[in-house]
Structure formats: C-alpha cells, structure tokens
Amino acid sequence: MGALSIRNVRKSYGPVEILKGIDIEVENGEFLILVGPSGCGKSTLLSMIAGLDTPTTGTIHIADRDVTYALPKDRDIAMVFQSYALYPNMNVGQNIAFGLEMRNVPKAQREEAIQRVSKMLQIGHLLDRKPGQLSGGQRQRVAMGRALARNPKLFLFDEPLSNLDAKLRVEMRAEIKLLHQRTKTTTVYVTHDQVEAMTLGDRIAVMRDGLVQQFGTPDDIYSRPATRFVAEFIGSPAMNIIDSQRASDGLAAQGVALLLNDAQRGALQAANAAGISYGLRPESLSFAEQGLPGTISMLEPTGPETYAMVDTAVGKLTARVAGKVHQHVGDNVHLRWQPEDAHLFDAKSEQRVVG
C-alpha cells in the first residue's frame, strides 16, 4: 500500500450519489491531480481525504493507516484552501506557526519552522505584515508556508490558484512544482484547469459524474485518452471530433472518406461499432496543397502559433499552426493529417477503440 489508498469510495447525500466507486493508489512522494468539471466530485473526494466528510462506503488509508473515520487532526495532513484561510489579526509569522502552536510545539522549533519556510517561499521580509497588507500571491505563499511548517505525510491543495490573475497563476504554479521537488511530500491537488493538471501532476485522475474516467500520467492522458470525454477535456484547443460511420473501405463522414491505417482498420473490425467518433488534435492538422478542402472562418494569433478554424464538409475543425499564417479569413485551404494521429472512440459507449 502506498502513501494514499482510496478503495471503492462512494458518497451519497440522500438519494443523490456524488461519488460512485473511486479506486486510487498514490505512491510515496507522488503528485496526484484530481481534475474535472464543476460537479464531478473532485472536491468531495478531497474533503473525505482531509476528514471534513466521510464516505458512505469504502475506505481511505494514509501511510498504511485506516483513516476513513479519523478526525482531521489525527490524519497528519496539511491543507491549502482556495480562500487562503489566513487569520486577519495575526501577522505572517504567526499565521505560519499557528498550527504548530496548537500542537504545543516548543517556541524554538516554531521559530525555526518560520525561518525555514519563509526562506523557501521568499517571504522573510513579510513576516511582520498582516494578511490585509499582502497581495493575492503573497497570501497564497503564506497559506502554503503554514502547510509546509508542519512537515505532514500528505499535502492537500483545493484549487489554490483560482483567485489569482493569469500571470500570477503561472508563477505560483511553478512555485508549487519547485516546492514539491524540494520536499518530496505526497500531494493531492484539486483543479478544474487542465493546464495545471498537465504541468503539475505525476499522475492525473480525470473525473466526471462521480467516476474516474482515466487515471494515468499526463502523457497517457493526452496521447491515449480512454474516453471521448477525456479527449475533449484535456488539451487546448480541444480535440476535433468528427462523427463518422462504418463504410466498405473504413470510415466516412458526410460522404468524405477518413484516413485509416491497417492497424486501425483491424481494430475497427474487432470492435464491431457502427458509429465512430474520429478525433484529431489541432496540432495534427496542417495546411497543404491537397487534403480535406475548407474555408477559414476565424484566425486566432497567439504569437508563437495561430489557431485557425476551418469550415469543412465534416464540420468545423481547428488547426494549431506554428507561427503566423499567410492566409486570411475567407480563404480556401486544404487540411492534411496522418492516419496514426487519429483517435477513434465508439460513438455509443464513448470508449476508446484505437488510435
């Protein structure tokens, strides 16, 4: 058993089932991301790991100890909230040390912890300030410092960057990753932001409607999404999906034959699925002399790359093109891709078929 073991955890509020059987094993020192849309159950699961709520059925173990019904104070965890949860009447140093003081840690050790974490987070010059005198990023550092001062078995982060502006989110994301590399403390991090999930996590649990749709490394999740939902949720811009049907020579959509290789044709025959969702990442599409014809309906330059939305016979497709494009809105173009770039999902079950 690893640092955190979640086994068949279910949670119901009356007749409404929020979690429908969650099984996750987290290794020592691992950074786990719980990601999914609002209402998927990720924050409910984190609350049960923290001891703020209890499962209807199932068990939770931390470091080989059953803590399913243990109080939060008995779990040896530290939590960082979205709202920072700092005490406004205390200065930064007092906020950092408050948890240690409540556990009757000697003053000398508390002072050592304050100096250690304030140096790590580069907030030593703020120790005498009150939270009201700090920026959002500084408050989040203090909240992280309070967690780090305890040196727990498990760090829990509940959407800690949601209240920050875009630039500060990027900076704090890097800070959190560096902190984890230094401390090697097992971490569970909840977010709805798939960019945070991909950049921070060692492994990711993608959740939807109280279930884990896929649990794997960022590369697994991105390169081989297990379901159509995962494929569309992870990645920006989202994966293009073309609704297609079986044809004598493979797959077709609106009379257009879709590219397949021999392995994909074989897998389709074995799957015996009538309808197929044919997925293409935007970066898999490029402009070419020949290919699927279409008309550019929108261009979104971002600097290093341009997102081009193209109207085609099989629907609107988004291409992610490196650098600037010389075409304009209204221009006719052709889109090209390789068969191995396609992701195929059963249209009915939404499960991955091949690709």
Image (cartoon, rainbow, N blue to C red):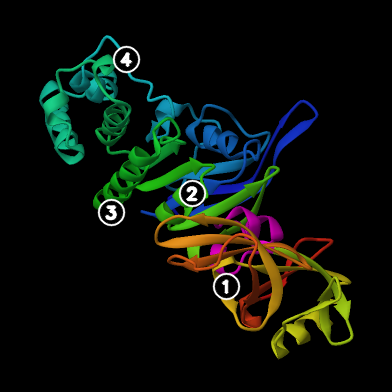
Residue carrying label 4 = 87
> Helix or strand or loop: what does disc 4 sit on?
loop
**Residue plotted at (85% across, 70% down):** 254
- Over which residues does the magenta segment extend? 220-240
Furthest-bottom residue in view?
Answer: 262
Q: CA distance from mark 1 to mark 2?
A: 26 Å
Q: Taking the image as drawn, is residue 192 in sight? A: yes
Q: CA distance from mark 3 to mark 2?
A: 15 Å
Going by the numbered disc 4, the residue's amino acid type is Tyr
Q: Earlier in the sequence, mark 1 or mark 2?
A: 2
In the shown orientation, is residue 274 left or right of residue 24? right
Mark 1 or mark 3: which is in front?
1
Q: Nearer the viewer, residue 292 or 234?
A: 292
**Residue plotted at (54% across, 68% down):** 283
Q: Taking the image as drawn, is residue 237 in sight? A: no
Residue carrying label 3 = 181
**Residue plotted at (49% across, 61% down):** 306
